[in-house]
Amino acid sequence: MKTQRLFFALWPSAPVRQAIVDMLAGLPPSIRGRNMQAHNLHITLHFLGQTTPEQRDCMHRAARSLKAAPFTFTLDRLGYFPRAKILWMGATTLPDELAQLHASLGAALTGCDYQVDSRHYQPHVTLKRKLAKMAPVADLRFSIPWPVDEFVLVESVPAEKGVDYRVIEKYPL
């Protein structure tokens, strides 16, 4: 049976994506790692993994059933996951609507044979992978408002330079 590697995500608009890319280009050269491709930038809501067509259909119906309000949050901080060696961008203040969207979607997906990750949800945009260490960036200031009026279902497809993320469904808020 053919499966797909799927996840639900927040997908930035072109202006938000460009603002993230511009900020990334302005990082000090001492922050070395493999940049994420601009077209792959996103915030994961729920990683589903290898999914059968039946599971995908169930998850699609669950996502369509959600009622959630649009919101805006501001990307304004960098972080580093040392174990994974990932530089990420996130928000100092998370809107309640984002936490509610994450929780509601997770609850809806449990009816589709999905187990919600038990770790604390930390929404972030991965910027660089394979960072040996994080250089100080104390003087770096940025603020990127991100209006959110939908979430998406994304397929991770193997590609020549790693993976490509392809939006296969959109769900308005």
Image: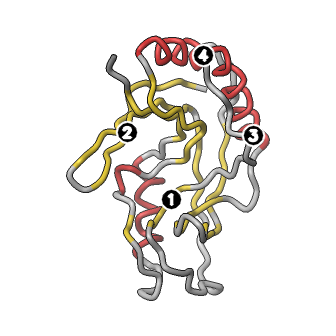
Query: What residue does disc 4 label?
Result: 112
Single out the mark in the foreground, 2 or 3.
Answer: 2
Single out the mark in the foreground, 3 or 4.
Answer: 4
Q: Residue furthest front?
A: 1
Q: What is the C-alpha distance between the residues marked 4 and 1? A: 27 Å
State yes or no: discs 3 and 1 in contact (Cβ < 8 Å): no
Q: What is the C-alpha distance between the residues marked 2 and 4? A: 20 Å
Disc on the earlier residue, 3 or 4: 3
Disc on the earlier residue, 2 or 1: 1
At label 4, counting other C-alpha atoms closer than 10 Å, the crowd grade (few under 14, some 14-19, many 20 or more) is some
Q: What is the C-alpha distance between the residues marked 2 and 1? A: 15 Å
Q: Residue furthest left?
A: 160
Q: Position of residue 93 (x, y in %)?
A: 76, 57
Q: SS for tag 3?
A: helix
Q: Residue at x 60, y 39 (%)?
A: 45
At label 1, counting other C-alpha atoms closer than 10 Å, the crowd grade (few under 14, some 14-19, many 20 or more) is many
State yes or no: discs 2 and 3 in contact (Cβ < 8 Å): no
Q: What's the amino acid at mark 4?
A: Cys
Q: What's the amino acid at mark 1?
A: Thr
Q: Is 11 situated left or right of 117 in this image?
A: left
At label 2, counting other C-alpha atoms closer than 10 Å, the crowd grade (few under 14, some 14-19, many 20 or more) is some
Number of numbered discs on residues:
4
Query: What residue does disc 1 label?
Result: 126
Query: What residue does disc 2 label?
Result: 156
Query: What residue does disc 3 label?
Result: 99
